[in-house]
Amino acid sequence: MVYTILRFISAMLCKIFFRIEVRGKKNMPKKGGFILASNHLSYLDPIILGVVSSRKLNYMARHDLFFNRFFGLLLLSLGVFPVKRNSADRPALKQAIKGLSKGRPLVLFPEGRRQSGLDPTPLEPLAGVGYLAAKANVAVIPACIKGTDKALPKGARYIKPARICVCFGKQINIERGLPYQETARLIMAKIRQLSC
């Protein structure tokens, strides 16, 4: 219920502030669990993905966002669960696989943090993304977001009107036995190949 209400409010606000274009939505599975792997430019990215998706999405978020009890409870009610960055957080990985096995789509940002618009150097994707893709045995759908770094750049306090484009690619076939880091690089490469 909380997710539905906040998604509706977010959708209304997005119509006011942004011109959102969506491409390749037919590539999103209509049922079952899948990994939605996206680039990450802004704090707006999870909200935009939730608004343009017809499915309820789940997210992994850095654990320190849950330090505030009220905000942490709100995140949990929205299908967000904590993960410790830069570590092999096995409980978080197990929770992710469990959710996927129950048919819940999971949003992942393979780079693990926002890419600065001022620094175009690609970030190395995290091996955990490759691990989940290999172990969960679900579809991996690449997504590319553009424009959110103009609407809410790193360090900005206010949202600016902007044109935002979200492009969903075709399912990525994960080769069995491929090292997790190589799988993560493959996924990130597919994301970068998408354009709006």
Image (tube, rainbow, N blue to C red):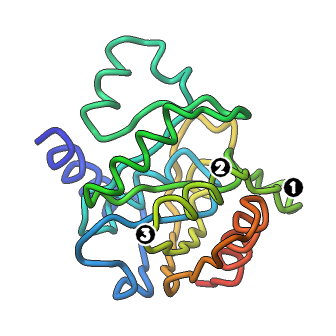
Q: Label 2's element? A: helix
Q: In which quarter of the image is the C terminus?
A: bottom right
**Quarter of the figure with residue 18:** bottom left
Most foreground residue, 124 or 176: 176
Contact (Cβ within 8 Å) of mark 3 with mark 1: no
Q: Residue 128 carries which label?
A: 2
Q: Reply above or below: 119 against 182.
A: above
Most foreground residue, 107 or 114: 107
Residue found at the far left of this picture: 1
Q: Which amino acid does label 1 sit on?
A: Asp
The percent coordinates of residue 71 (x first, y second) are: 36, 21
Most foreground residue, 131 or 162: 131
Asked if residue 77 lies left or right of residue 22, the reply is left
The percent coordinates of residue 118 (x first, y second) are: 84, 54
Would you name the residue on which mark 3 appears?
138
The percent coordinates of residue 161 (x first, y second) are: 49, 59
For marks 3 and 1, the one nearer the N-term is 1
Q: Which amino acid does label 2 sit on?
A: Gly
From mark 2 to mark 3, how far is it between C-alphas? 15 Å
Would you name the residue on which mark 1 appears?
119
